[in-house]
Image (cartoon, helix red, strand yellow):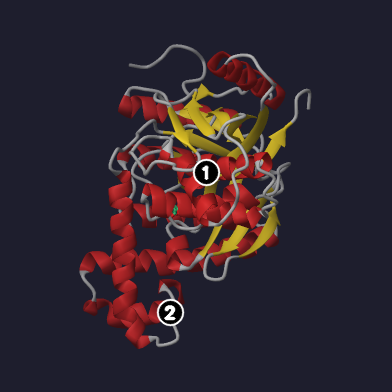
Amino acid sequence: MPASGRSRSHTAFEPSEPTLRAAHERAFRERFGVGAAPRVFFAPGRVNLMGAHLDYNGGPVMPMAIDRGTFVALAPRSDRVLRLASTLEPGAVELALDAPPPASGHWYDYPLGVVHALRGGGHAATCGADVLFGGNLAIGAGLSSSASITVATAFALDALWSLGLARRDHVQVALWAEREFVGVRCGIMDPHAVGLSRPGHLLWLDCRDETTEHLLLDTDAVSIAVADTGVRRELAHVAFNERVRECGEAFERLRRHVPEATCLRDVPLDVLREHEDELDATVARRARHVLEEVARTFTARDALRAGDVETFGAQMTAAHASLRELFEVSVPELDCLVDAAAACEGVLGSRLTGAGFGGCTVVLLRSGAREELESALGSAFERRFGRAPRVAVYRGDGGPRELLAGG
Ligand code: GLA
């Protein structure tokens, strides 16, 4: 049923960071009572523009941190108890720092995994704390809410306990928490994007050797929009783990033809073409996506360096077709948004972002084309699915930080 009003998509207008900080501090006081003012920390979410499903294959990726993320308000306690609560999720937990419980399938497994990772790394927790999580990042929408909460927790506990960790340590702690404690075989892209990004830049991360480069995005000329389908698939992590397994199988079969290869990314496309019949048909499609996406991602980087945003955008749209046909992680709602964006003047490219199976598309558009985009996506999506997608334009953000009162 079409909604009334001029624009048929929901546009998210966000309050300023100081306003959000103040609201989160108030929520903390309501939850834990009045006492010393809490410290408040922030870690962003991310979109990925190029390099879909390449991180766990050792390929290059090009994410950007966004100005939406996780807020963590925290105050020390005089005992060794940690209380974790959230404004976004039901359920809270109280635990003994010296004997933290195992994973239980609740949202607080993510911060709890960080506590376990820090303990395992021999870092001393000097006091207990009351901690309230919240923020303005859609959960489970492919914007990396999980890396956002784990990196935010690592950063905040590092500050509370004066651990003196480096940014790359936060990334490693976050990765351990999600992989080993929560049990999702995620790649390395998300915590790197959340932990290492710089405002106004895309992050180039080569996942084979973890080298990074910050690539300037001309934000006067182009903007990045995200359109949320609203589709959340419960079993997305099962399908994700299945893709990881299939890519692993492709590598195991192809590596005998490329003895020096250390990951699927190292296998030349010609070798895949020559030996495709040795692979199960599904596994061959996955491998083809990976190897062609590696080539597209290098093309996109060269184009960005040369200021050629048209070529960059074309790589994004080609990536989506491959994610739909070969990697099979799209859904009709995502395809509808990508097709509608392609028909819209001022759009340079778009594709699903994150793992797929629902969530969001990311759109590269000429600055100034935002209204056309919103109305094009809104009407196409509503015609087909009877509801409006949420469309927002994001600025490239930096990594985690403390938000100071009055700052
Ligand atoms: C999820 C994973 C990432 C990455 C993307 C797909 O977001 O957490 O590590 O594999 O999917 O590019």
Q: Which of 326 and 45 is in front in this view?
A: 45
Q: Nearer the viewer, mark 2 or mark 1?
A: 1
Image position, residue 334 (x, y; %)? 38, 40
Residue 349 point in image, percent of width and height: 52, 48
In the picture, residue 384 is in which quadrant?
Answer: top left
Which quarter of the figure is the N terminus placed in? top left
Asked if residue 96 is positioned above or below residue 291 in the image, the reply reads above
The circle on residue 237 is none
Please give the label number shown on residue 268.
2
Residue type (three-letter) at the residue carrying disc 2: Pro
Which quarter of the rendering shows the C terminus?
top right
Q: How crowded is mark 2: few (under 14 residues within 10 Å), some or many (20 or more)?
A: some
Question: Is ligand 1 closer than 8 angstroms to the Cβ of mark 2?
Answer: no
Find residue 351 and report its horizontal and vertical position in percent. Answer: 46, 47
Q: Which residue is drawn at 57% across and 45% down?
A: 151
Dot 1 falls on a residue whose secondary structure is: helix
CA neighbours of label 1 inside 10 A, class few (<14), some (14 to 19), many (20+): many
Percent x, y of residue 15: 65, 21
Amino acid type at image mark 1: Thr
Closer to the camera, 207 or 328? Answer: 207
Q: Disc 1 marks which residue? A: 150
Label 2 secondary element: loop
Q: Is residue 313 visible?
A: no
